[in-house]
Structures are given as structure tokens and as C-alpha cells.
Image (cartoon, helix red, strand yellow):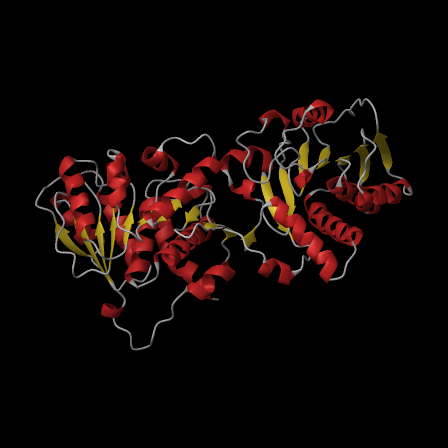
Amino acid sequence: MKIFNISHISDLEKSTIERTPIASIELMERAAVEFVKVFTKEVSNRHRIFVFAGHGNNGGDALAIARLLAAENYSVKCFLLNTKNSLSADCNTNKNKLAQTGVSFHEIQQSFSPPKIEKDDIIIDGLFGSGIRNKALTGGFAALVKYINNTEAKIYSIDMPSGLFGEDNSQNTKDTIVKAFKTFTYHFPKLSFLMSDSNAYVGNWEVLEIGLDKQSIAQLDTPYYYLTKEDIQPLLQTRNRFVHKNQLGHALIIAGGRGKTGAAILCAKSCLKAGSGLVTSLLPACGEHDMQTTFPEAMVIADKENNFISEIPDISPYSAIGIGPGIGKNTATGSALIELFSQVQIPIVLDADALNIISQDKEWLRIVPANSILTPHVGEFDRLVGKSESSYERLQKALYLAATLKCVIVIKGAYTAICTPDQDVFFNSTGNQGMATAGSGDVLTGIMTGLLAQNYKPVDAARIGVFVHGLAGDIALEKQSHESLIASDIIDNLGFAFSHIRS
């Protein structure tokens, strides 16, 4: 699924009106109908509904929604903020339609004393939506947003929380943004929804389909995508009936240290479960027995050192390498990593301590092999390139790093962002809070390494790996809870995840 900047969405709406053909007021009515369909499934008509509408098209949506909810026997009070006496044409049309009903309707053209709103009431925010581009709310609108946020009522925003910018909110005034309980957005998620520092304003969000012109969507370029099953399914390879393990790749997993053999086991196991034909695990001598007894399907190379990895073996037998989970930052381990960089000519996944070693000397970033996949969480990424003031700034840094290194940068999080050397960004749609658990990242490294071993391109291995990892976590959650889900549960459900994508 494509994600567009706010300005591009306006272009798509205009194209839909020109090509379909459909009048803009009809498109607005369609949007209102879709909002009411999902809203009435979540909110019963025992609640009082307070609708706040602005003077633009988001306000027009709100007025149409107020009318439709009243027709569904909801108690609706509607407030249209028209302080500049400058309603958009469609907003004015919906104002006149609403005035012909029995809905409690107040058009505010001067000073405004907001109504008393109780905890059990519901607020529908239709002040601005995507009509705000990059200028923070001020004056009466800012005061109203603060009032709305200070009520105890649940807030549902139309398309976007009013006051939120569509992309970069680093310069926004945070206390003048509506803090929605839920946002029903139209046709596409907005880029800012996928930034961690917008979560407090967007709340839960759901995309509503309103029938924008598909040809226009296909023709309009964007660097941003939201991964769905339909995107991943065609990327999966099919196996010839006569295939044998040597044709499915041989992965080398370099992981583990004293007290962290579990990281090596999780990584090796997920690598094999992702389809690699063979997996060899290089780990300190102290972990050899645990690996051989816990995961007999993996072959093992024990380092000469008992507690840490000190040297890299001959890598010629391998088709992909994953390195980092649990290896620590011993000087000898760091030297081995740099030596690996000078030798490797096959795809490699760098995670955890491999990234922490590199962050100790930024010059080492320059020798990271092209086509590598780097999988930092936010803290590891900031150690690599410096602290960012916002999620959007971090994303731009990741894009720059991906282009500079000619590597894939995977910023792990709620909507894991896969940044490519071609400056595309793929946000993941799967996964849940229960996956914030020890070893989850080790499993992801194993999955991606297993895919690389099977000759998937790095960008495809990253996209499939992140999606499958999150989907396996979602399937595991059906039998677990956020508190009880552990990394092994993700591995146990990888097969179901792959089957679900293929089905």
C-alpha cells in the first residue's frame, strides 16, 4: 500500500472527481457514510455525541457525520467554528443540510463558551484534519483543542487529529494537537501516524476506503509504502519438488557469548525455520554443548575462546551471514568483525552488538559491505549516527545512511521502517506490543539471514523478514497475552505465518 504526503492526497481527490466522475460533495458524503459505519459499531447511541467542525472540508465531513448519526438515533450536539465567515463550498452545503434536521446545531462566529462535556460523552474532532500542513494552531482554536483534550471524554478524529502535521511534527506545538482515542483516516495512513512521537495524538487508527481513483493512485509516485499481505505474497519463492537442502543455502550465524548462548540458539533456529537449507552456528566454546543439545538441527563451530568470539572461520561455504546477537564488545570480537568486513562478498545481517561495536568507531561504518542489512532498534541507531530530536529526523538520517552505505537500514519499532539504498521506505503493518521481549530481535536476524541464504535480494529479505516476524508474533498473541509472549513463541509460529501469507 502506498503512503502519500498530504499535498498528494489532495491531488488524488481532485483526480477522482475529474475521472470518476463524482462531485466533491458526493465524495464527502461517501467519506461520512464510511465513518458512521465503523463508528456505530464501536459506540452505542447511549452516549451523547459532541461534534466540533471547522470551516474547511474536514468540517464538512463532520457536519455530514453529525447528520447521519442523528438519523441513527444518536443524541448529537454540533458546533461549527466559523469565526472568519469563510466556509468551504462543501462545508457550507453540509451546514445547510444539517440545519434542515432537528440536530442541536451552533454556528460560532465570535467568542465561544464550550459546552460541558462529561466522561461518558464522545467527542468527534472535525476541526481541521489534514487541512493543517505545517503551521501550529493558535488563538481560539488552540484554546478549544486544549479544552477538548482536558475533558475525560473519548475523542474520535476524522482523517487526522486536528493540529497534527501530516509528516514532520518536530516544530509543532504539542499541546495544541488533539489527543484522539481513535482516528478514522481515509484511504491511506498518514506518514506521521507511523512515527512514535505521534502516538499520543493519533491513538488507534483505522483506514477507511472511500473509492479514490485507482489509476491515479497507481500513477502517482511516492517513496513511502505500508506493507500488507498483498505486497509480500508475490515476493515468496516456490520450491521445486526435487529441491534439496544444498540448493536452499547455507547460513552462518555468528552469535552468543558467556551467559548469552540463548541468543545464538534463537537466531540459528529462526534461520532454519525461515527456510535456509543448512545453518552453522559459530559461538564461544562455552555454548557448544547447549547448542548441540537444544537445537540439534544446527551445525556448530566452537571458537577457541571459551567466553567470546575471537576469530572468523573460512566463510567460503556460506551463502549468507548473520552476526551480532549476544556477541558482546570484546576487543578480539571487534577485530574479528572488521576482519569479516574485509573478506565478505555475500549478504550479511548486522544486529545488536555488531552494531554496538561499529558505533565505537564511526569510521568502521564506512567499511560496512554494500548490500548488508543493518537492524538497529532506536537506541542502537542513535549510537551509530547521533541522537535525533524526532522520529521523522531519525527516518531521514536512516535514508541518508542507506544511500551512503548502499545498504538496507531496518529501524525496529512499532511500525518497523525498512529504508533502502534507492530511498524508499517500507513500514511494517504486522506485530504487537508483546514482541517487546528479550530475543525478539535475535529471531528477526535469523529470519532475514535464512532468507538471504536462499538468494532473496536484501530488500526483499528485509521486507519479508520483518512482515513474517510480526505476523508470527500476531498469531502467537492469539494464544498468549502481551505479557506472556516470548521470542520462542514467535519462532513456533513462523510456519503458520508463511502459510497465512501464501493462502
Residue at the limit of the structure toward the left, as seen here: 304
* Left or right placement of residue 268 versus residue 118 in this view: left
Q: Quadrant of the N terminus?
A: bottom right
Q: Where in the figure is residue 31, as x and y percent of width and height?
A: 72, 50
Q: Compare residues 430 and 286 and report the one nearer the observer.
A: 430
The image quarter in which residue 57 lies: top right
Residue at 52% across, 42% down:
194
Q: Where in the figure is residue 19, as x and y percent of width and height?
A: 72, 62
Q: Where in the figure is residue 411, as x and y percent of width and height?
A: 40, 43
* Left or right placement of residue 414 versus residue 318 in this view: right
223 to 178, vertically: above or below:
below
Residue at 51% across, 52% down:
225
Residue at the limit of the structure toward the bottom, as seen here: 242
Residue at 33% across, 75% down:
240
* Left or right placement of residue 373 versus residue 61 in this view: left
Q: Compare residues 427 and 219 and report the one nearer the observer.
A: 219
Residue at the limit of the structure toward the right, as seen here: 100
Can residue 355 be seen at all in this image of the molecule?
yes
Q: Where in the figure is residue 420, as x and y percent of width and height?
A: 40, 51
Can residue 483 be seen at all in this image of the molecule?
no
